[in-house]
Image: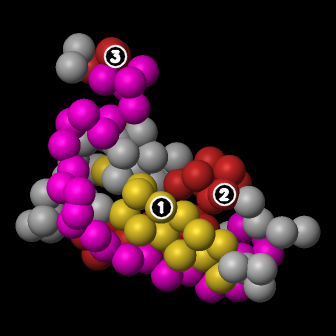
Amino acid sequence: MAVTKEEIMNALRSVMDPEIGLDVVSLGLVYDVSISDSGEVQIKMTMTTPGCPLVGMMTEDVKNVIETIDGVKSVQVELVWDPPWTADMIAPEVRAKLGI
């Protein structure tokens, strides 16, 4: 069975930014997910700041979570800085809860 983007995004909701306490999807850190027919997953994501000290840990968490999905053969995480992350990228329902 082919892996879907929805499965990937749902799995990514379990990866938390430990400094903020929110998942990478709700924070708007995941910019793109592509999946090849053979199960190779490529994720483009960013961090809240370019100097984030947790970048290594968070990208490993992303890889580890996605590798557990049936049908995933490999995972590549690419960090991108354009467009720069802003609080406007946080999911609207989460912004409302945070009072932003």
- Can you say which quadrant of the picture contains the N terminus? bottom right
Q: Which of marks 3 and 1 is in front?
A: 1
Q: What amino acid is at disc 3?
A: Lys
Q: Which region of the structure is painted magenta?
A: 69-95
Image quarter of residue 60: bottom left
* Residue placed under numbered mark 2 in the picture: 5
Please tell me whether residue 84 is drawn above or below residue 20 in the rendered image: below
* Residue placed under numbered mark 1 in the picture: 32
Where is residue 97 drawn, in percent x and y?
A: 34, 16
Where is residue 27 drawn, in percent x and y?
A: 34, 42
Q: Which of marks 2 and 3 is in front?
A: 2
Please tell me whether residue 92 is drawn above or below residue 43 in the rendered image: above
Residue 23, can we see it? no
Per the model, the C-alpha gap separating discs 3 and 1 is: 25 Å
Q: What amino acid is at disc 1?
A: Asp
- Going 21% across and 66% down the picture, which residue do you hit? 81
Labelled pair 3, 1 in contact (Cβ < 8 Å): no
Where is residue 30 drawn, in percent x and y?
A: 41, 56
- Can you say which quadrant of the picture contains the C terminus? top left
Please tell me whether residue 86 is drawn above or below residue 37 in the rendered image: above
Element type at mark 3: helix
Q: How crowded is mark 1: few (under 14 residues within 10 Å), some or many (20 or more)?
A: few
Element type at mark 2: helix
* Residue placed under numbered mark 3 in the picture: 97
| Magenta run includes residue 13 | no
Residue 82, can we see it? yes
- Which of disc 1 and disc 3 is earlier in sequence? 1
* Residue 7 vs residue 56, the one in the foreground: 7
